[in-house]
Amino acid sequence: MAEEMMNNKQIILKHYVEGYPKESDMEFKNNNIKLNVPEGSNVVVLMNLYLSCDPYMRSRMKNLEDSYVESFTPGYPITGCGVAKVLKSGDSNFQEGDLVWGMIGWEEYSIVTPTQSFLFKIHDKNVPLSYYTGILGMPGITAYVGFYNVCSPKKGETVFVSSASGAVGQLVGQFAKMLGCYVVGSAGTKQKVDMLKSKFGFDEAFNYKEEQDLDAALKRYFSDGIDIYFDNVGGKMFDAVLLNMKLHGRIAMCGMISQYNLKKTEGVHNLLCLIAKRICMKGFIVSDHFRLYSKYLEMIIPQIKGGNIVYVEDIVEGLENAPKALVGLFYGRNVGKQVVMVSRE
Amino acid sequence: MAEEMMNNKQIILKHYVEGYPKESDMEFKNNNIKLNVPEGSNVVVLMNLYLSCDPYMRSRMKNLEDSYVESFTPGYPITGCGVAKVLKSGDSNFQEGDLVWGMIGWEEYSIVTPTQSFLFKIHDKNVPLSYYTGILGMPGITAYVGFYNVCSPKKGETVFVSSASGAVGQLVGQFAKMLGCYVVGSAGTKQKVDMLKSKFGFDEAFNYKEEQDLDAALKRYFSDGIDIYFDNVGGKMFDAVLLNMKLHGRIAMCGMISQYNLKKTEGVHNLLCLIAKRICMKGFIVSDHFRLYSKYLEMIIPQIKGGNIVYVEDIVEGLENAPKALVGLFYGRNVGKQVVMVSRE
């Protein structure tokens, strides 16, 4: 088999990161890659199209010992969810020309072993391909599983979503509205807050950065309390929400973007509310629920095509801009799901 | 109907309490009481026998606004669970001479309205009557519901119980052993730690006051992590446990005795573990589950009579000693369930 040696631009993590990540923690580098499948191997050779920037990736920039995710390896490319095209395949589930999404490298070409990681074939191409990094990918299943399964929502309940304009939050809000819930979201800029109401149909929204007293802000929108809190941020907001939960409320713990860059996480003081209010609080990891993916697609694709669900992405072009995009997540610079376009289809 | 005016000694809460409660926050007082049921009333007149000292009573010494329990009223007797004898009854469910347990006053005689509070008739008297303040009363159902329902335990799982020699903890530990779990408990004196192993059959036990590093202590006993944590204390222990939970672990939040006397509760920093480990954490209140009481009795009474379950009480005699007994709870002075005997049967 002829070996094609190609130039492969990559985003390398230079070292483990403390505090807020900086662009200079990453390096844009040229490497070479042989785009071939060795005899007897089941690897798949991919040309990468879109990369997903997700908050959980911050954890992987640390030296993790005992975590559900693996640390990135300093000196090697960052990895994350992305959309790609199959160039060659040693796995009978994938053919040349297939479009896929799954765990790929932050680079132009990746060679992955589908049995060691995860790679889903993309069947429906009548939607923007980038959606497979978001609403049709990991954040989508996260919102679906987190809201419907973890929160056990009922029509008419009151729902609060933090980081509500993000990849997951915007979907949770829309799912809750579809079910007939009252939904309030928080975000960090006026533009995002406006978007929550005008674009995603949240009943109310507020800018948490402009609130002196988060407890008071929540009481303004939830005079009778919160049945469901979909937590994407942790920290002070979480503590304020505890004071405002209703009896038998449910909290889905999806992520804690406010805490990832702190050396010591903020202390949460109001856990006694969990007892008094009989709250059920659950952490979950989307990859445990991938078996629900096809069921989710059956539900969501018609909703997208019918215009019942909207999805806002923030797409930057060029792999070289990926570090800036990833760093921007932690400053809330993205408006909607942050995606990096590596190559046009 | 002839009115019997009687002397009625009472324990009065003098004022709302800040910090650790003191005996001087309460007052031993003589009052008069008419031991009669007014025409058409459904009250029940009780002679009180045993009073229960429970950690949650600390909350009721505060001015609570929005809680699952009501504040005590300064100037009036403290109320709590207790065992009593029916002297007169306006409620057809209770007859003169019945023994009952339920919410009564810290006084010699109480007049209660069973429909407004709760009062259970005691059917089985071939056990110590004081047990109806503990293993056969509220702490018993708490341990039963909290362990079997909230924790969803399975044979062979690893269980950690804090405040393990207390009314609830000693039962949770024994239930877990009956199911074939590995059980470790923490307590605050050598005597209690010894009792956990020798009397209640815990696999291991440790004195949390002698541990510099609670995380290290837990790792010593749970090298592969904790499946179930039955939390009676909150605070630092809770935070250390979070670091040691297993994937898909469960935490029952029963109470937080370490936090009740603090002006500001300690911050909990390790909640991110709930996500990484997919933990389910639930607060619960025993009174929501009283419907399971008769089922619980059917299970537990044969176990007591058969000697499979033991129960340790710390009984002080005399209503005048009740304040000291209650205060002692928060210093861990009691060994086993703290009970006050008001009157011999």
Image (tube, coloured by chain):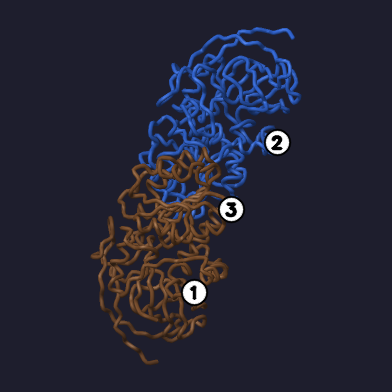
Chain colours: A brown, B blue
Q: Quadrant of the N terminus of chain A?
A: bottom left
Look at the image and tell me whether residue B276 can be seen.
no
Image coordinates of residue A35 in percent, x first then y, are 37, 85
Residue A51 placement: quadrant: bottom left
On whether disc 2 and disc 1 are found on a single subunit, the reply is: no
Q: Secondary structure at mark 2?
A: helix
* Tag 3–tag 2 contact (CB < 8 Å): no
Amino acid at circle 3 = Lys
Above or below: residue A271 compared with residue A13:
above
Q: Nearer the viewer, mark 3 or mark 2?
A: 3
The mark found on residue B291 in the picture is none
Amino acid at circle 1 = Phe
Number of residues whose C-alpha sits closer than 10 Å to that of mark 2, classed few (under 14), some (14–19) or many (20 or more): few
Q: Nearer the viewer, mark 2 or mark 1?
A: 1
* Tag 3–tag 1 contact (CB < 8 Å): no
The residue that mark 2 highlights is B294
Residue A58 placement: quadrant: bottom left
The residue that mark 3 highlights is A155
The residue that mark 1 highlights is A120
Amino acid at circle 2 = Ser
Look at the image and tell me whether residue B336 can be seen.
yes
**Residue drawn at point x = 42 percent, y = 52 percent:** A205
Q: Is residue B40 left or right of residue B243?
A: right
Image coordinates of residue B265 in percent, x first then y, are 40, 36
Residue in front for this viewpoint, B338 or A132: A132
